[in-house]
């Protein structure tokens, strides 16, 4: 899973100042709900000391699978000011290690180790605000959207949400009944439009690929609040989001009004990493400052800083290993670091020297990275 930028969270920085590294929790599974035949909702009890989070953030679940510790990030579908417990959704992915293990083996009462909530696909809410969130979701990309919908509708009485939700068929619509209930409860403020790849004979809605003509028809049904008050959010398969970006660009929607959350599996393809020239091919020493300690690691060509540190038993924070979730973020105090993927960092973060160790390679011998 990878995460784009909606709005920076000051609370995240406050947490980092309060303690040197990310917090870890052992959460008890309170309920497991079958949302579709391929997707479940995992509800965790809030611990005695409540875990604070923001709508749009994710939890990193850490589970021993086949004798190996596996980490995967899952967006929270619960909302902090609405739901008493924490909840994530998990959809089976073909050959997905964690996404298949969890529905097959996890039981109510089990404890799961998780890393504190992270992610920047967030916004601040205020009763005085009046805005329109136009969302495009596909498949399990509905998860952070549901959390944001709950928060916006309950915290901003003058704001509205329009959701365009794409799925393969009617049986694969995650949170279908819950979305309908919220739409009924907040009639006129939440508008859900479903698009199906495979529509049944009696389907009255949209079907097929979201294209320019379909988007034009959709926008005719959606309130037009103007660019100043409209923000475009998207989360789902990369192909869907690229398509939506192209369609919005064709309508002259400015890029700074569009925010996305990307879901990816596993790590960046090693072959693709190897194709990218890293300059001089030689091992370079990197100094890592983390949790009050200083570590020195020799990073070989075409190996990442995180891979090298983990191999040497240094327990650095990480989650997606794809350069998008920012769980492994650190600040390069000196030296030059090349990143295979920069989407997880904002332009200002890159300017300030922040790097992602999971996709980072040292280009000089004087790299010093501070994490936490």
Image (cartoon, rainbow, N blue to C red):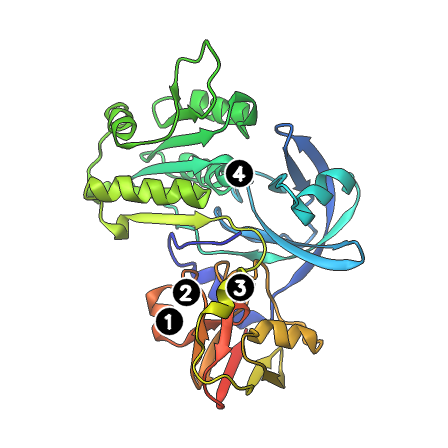
Q: Earlier in the sequence, mark 1 or mark 3?
A: 3
**Separation of residues labelled 2 and 3 (CA atoms):** 18 Å
Residue positioned 54% across, 75% down in the render: 302
Q: Residue placed at 50% from the left, 58% from the top?
A: 325
Name the quarter where the C terminus is drawn: bottom right
Is the Cβ of the residue at disc 1 closer than 8 Å to that at disc 3?
no
- Tell me the distance, in whole angstroms, between the alpha carbons under discs 1 and 3: 25 Å
Mark in the foreground, 2 or 1: 2
Q: Nearer the viewer, residue 99 or 13?
A: 99
Q: Earlier in the sequence, mark 2 or mark 3?
A: 3
CA gap, disc 4 and disc 2 = 24 Å
Q: Mark 2 — residue? A: 342
**Which of pointers 4 and 2 lies earlier in the amino acid sequence?**
4
- Lower sequence index among marks 3 and 4: 4
Q: Residue at x 43, y 37 (%)?
A: 137
196 left or right, relative to 312: left
Q: Position of residue 164 (x, y in %)?
A: 38, 31
Binning the other alpha carbons within 10 Å of mark 4 as few (below 14), some (14 to 19) or many (20 upward) gives: many
**For the residues carrying marks 2 and 3, which lies nearer the camera in this image?**
3
State the image coordinates of residue 9 (x, y, percent, origin top left): 43, 58
Q: Residues within 10 Å of mark 3 (few under 14, many from 20)?
A: few
User: Which residue was labeled with disc 3?
Assistant: 271
For the residues labelled 3 and 4, say whether their Cβ atoms are less than 8 Å apart.
no
**Residue at the spot of label 4:** 140
Looking at the image, do the residues carrying marks 2 and 1 touch, with CB atoms under 8 Å apart?
yes
CA gap between label 3 and label 4 equals: 28 Å
Image: 216 above or below 129: above
Give the residue number, with chain letter if any, for mark 1: 350
The one nearer the camera, 356 or 22, is 356
Q: Is residue 237 left or right of residue 38?
A: left
Q: Earlier in the sequence, mark 2 or mark 1?
A: 2
């Amino acid at each position: 899973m990878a995460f784009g930028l909606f709005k920076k969270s000051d609370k995240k920085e406050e947490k980092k100042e309060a303690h040197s590294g990310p917090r870890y929790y052992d959460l008890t599974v309170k309920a497991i709900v079958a949302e579709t035949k391929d997707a479940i909702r995992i509800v965790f009890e809030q611990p005695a000391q409540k875990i604070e989070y923001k709508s749009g953030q994710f939890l990193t679940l850490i589970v021993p699978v086949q004798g190996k510790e596996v980490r995967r990030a899952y967006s929270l579908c619960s909302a902090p000011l609405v739901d008493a417990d924490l909840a994530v959704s998990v959809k089976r992915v073909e050959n997905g290690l964690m996404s298949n293990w969890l529905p097959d083996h996890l039981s109510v009462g089990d404890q799961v180790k998780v890393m504190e909530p992270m992610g920047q696909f967030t916004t601040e809410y205020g009763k005085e605000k009046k805005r329109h969130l136009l969302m495009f979701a596909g498949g399990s990309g509905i998860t952070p959207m549901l959390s944001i919908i709950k928060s916006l509708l309950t915290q901003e009485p003058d704001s509205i949400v329009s959701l365009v939700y794409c799925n393969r068929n009617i049986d694969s619509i995650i949170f279908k009944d819950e979305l309908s209930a919220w739409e009924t409860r907040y009639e006129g403020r939440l508008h859900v439009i479903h698009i199906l790849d495979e529509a049944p004979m009696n389907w009255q809605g949209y079907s097929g690929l979201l294209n320019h003509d379909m988007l034009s028809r959709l926008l005719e049904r959606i309130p037009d609040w103007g660019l100043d008050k409209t923000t475009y959010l998207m989360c789902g398969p990369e192909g869907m989001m690229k398509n939506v970006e192209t369609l919005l660009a064709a309508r002259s929607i400015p890029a700074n009004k569009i925010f996305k959350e990307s879901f990816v599996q596993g790590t960046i393809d090693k072959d693709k990493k190897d194709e990218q020239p890293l300059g001089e091919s030689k091992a370079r020493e990197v100094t890592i400052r983390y949790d009050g300690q200083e570590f020195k690691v020799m990073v070989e060509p075409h190996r990442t800083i995180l891979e090298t540190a983990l191999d040497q038993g240094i327990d650095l924070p990480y989650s997606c290993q794809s350069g998008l979730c920012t769980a492994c973020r650190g600040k390069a105090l000196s030296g030059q670091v090349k990143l295979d993927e920069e989407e997880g960092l904002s332009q200002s973060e890159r300017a300030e020297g922040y790097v992602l160790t999971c996709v980072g390679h040292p280009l000089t011998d004087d790299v010093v990275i501070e994490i936490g």
